[in-house]
Image (cartoon, rainbow, N blue to C red):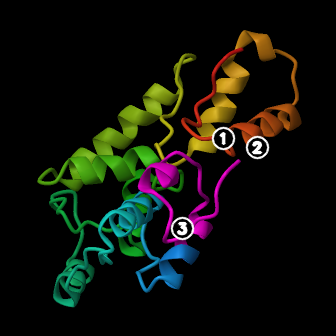
Amino acid sequence: MRPSLTKEMMVKDFTNFYWLKEELQAFCREHGMSSSGSKLELTKRIETFLTTGERTKPARKSNNQKRAALSADLSLDTVITENHRCSQQARAFFNEVIGPTFHFSTYIQTYFKENVGKTYRDAVAAWYEEEKRKKQPTYKNEIAPQFEYNQFIRDFFADPKNKGKSRAVAIESWNIIKNLPGSNKYISK
């Protein structure tokens, strides 16, 4: 059975179980830590707290950096920086260049994070390459590690033993596995 998330729990117990982002945020608020950031950032913050008692803060960008990024005119030659934001201004730019089908997919967000120094022209090319890959019959978009539920459901239905089973059965299986210690990955039985 899954333990309660408390400051007395062992890190091993914390990492052995599945936690909703809302639970992680509530824990952070309750213990005087920032509740902002991704699920992975919150998990790391809580691991540090449970291990050392240290209350780490999220990395903050200075307001000057943010203002400079907002005030800069965007072009195909705009260089992707470490401080890149998927902002409304960037969205408007890519909608103008690519068209109304553009959105900040997980793929393109990851592209920005992993390609500091490249340009928006490179990002546009990457967008079109990904759109081309999506049309392939074998294409499956990558599911980021924090979306364990989505990965479990995909793997459940990919198992030939589950052919014809309902989504309700898949969710029931997920609800069982997420409350057990250890991995939340789907394992064929």
* Nearer to us: label 1 or label 3: 1
The residue tagged 2 is 175
In the structure shown, which secondary structural element does the residue marked by tag 2 occupy? helix
Amino acid carrying mark 3 in the image = Leu
The residue tagged 3 is 24
Q: Residue furthest top?
A: 160
Please say whether residue 102 is visible from this viewpoint: no
The residue tagged 1 is 180
Name the residue: 67% across, 51% down.
2
Q: Is residue 64 above or below residue 167?
A: below
Nearer to me, 149 or 69: 149
Query: CB under 8 Å between callouts 1 and 2?
Result: no
* Coordinates of residue 117 in the picture (x, y in percent): 11, 53
Q: Few, some or many C-alpha atoms within 10 Å of disc 1 (few <14, some 14-19, many ≥20)?
A: some
Magenta range is 1-25
Q: Position of 97 compared to 171: left or right?
A: left
Q: Few, some or many C-alpha atoms within 10 Å of disc 2 (few <14, some 14-19, many ≥20)?
A: few
Name the residue: 73% across, 10% down.
160
